[in-house]
Amino acid sequence: MNRFKEILFVLLLVFFLQSCAGWAKNKDYHPFDASGLDKLIPGKSTAAQVIEILGAPSEIVKLSNGNAYIYRRSLSKGTGLWLLIVSFGNYDKHYDQIVIFVNKKNVMTHYGVTLDAYKAAYGLPF
Amino acid sequence: MASPFKVFSFVIYPFIVGSLITGCVSYRVIKAVEGRSVSNIFEEFQVGTTTLREALEVLGAPDQVAELEGKDVLIYRRLLLVNSGLSFGIPLTDIWGPSFDFSAYGELVRYDLLFLSFTPDGMLSGIASEKGSRYPYLKTIFSDKKGN
């Protein structure tokens, strides 16, 4: 029994002496302030006001009845764990996105908001 | 008190055993998730009734916006990547030259997608969705069906 414990101890020691872990965080930063949306009123606010409040968009897409101004930033977190013969990696990426729909008269008609970047988390792949 | 030789053996053996085992057998799993989960909105949204405003309120900002044949398309997407690899080998290349080695690697990227199209006046005109994440990893990666 003692011999078994010794072998088990050696194996566990091997496992931990040969292991390492790592963490990583990446940010694709765009400094728009989503609280500025409170100042924008669909049907009234203009494209110029949108840009004044939110800043330059990350992307502009032409639509059938105007344009969509897209504001986007992301946060990703990665975790790595190496245990002798097995290794695990996990990568989680989430976005903050605002899409403003502007009609041909340059008036904002709709907007959609997703603020999920904070949900990016460190972890293991199971 | 434990003999220093016994303590020494408990430290040095793990290093030797670990160094020999490392590289002989290895297994890795990597998972990557990008974006939020895509809702199943088939019961909630109706073609000809649901408006762009309602869709944006429920789903938030889309991941992609485009114009397609006079209609505005919103795409919501979530990516799920799983990569795994198993390797057996004898790491004696430096002293022996080429030696036995067997490796198997696989990577599967699945997408959860929701496609909504709207008329220029903002009325829902089409819905399509695909939940790629429901397909099991091993069964999907080993499938040889055409188109898979």
Image (cartoon, rainbow, N blue to C red):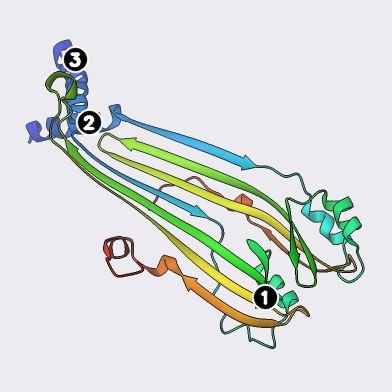
Q: Which residue is drawn at 17% across and 24% down?
A: B93
Placement of B136 over or under B86, stated as above or below: below
Same chain for marks 2 and 3? yes
In-image side of A96 versus A17 (left or right): right
Q: Nearer the viewer, residue B97 or A119?
A: B97
- Left or right for A96, reference B133: right
Count of numbered tags = 3
Q: Nearer the N terminus, badge 3 or badge 1?
A: 3
* Residue in the picture at 53% in, 48% down: A121
1 and 2 marks on the same chain: yes
* Picture layout, residue A55 above or below residue A99: above
List the residue tagged with mark 1. B69
Q: State the image quarter where residue A110 is shown.
A: bottom right
Which SS class for mark 2? loop
Could you say which disc has been placed on residue B22 in the image? 2
- A46 vs A18, left or right, is right
Looking at the rendered structure, the kind of residue marked 1 is Glu
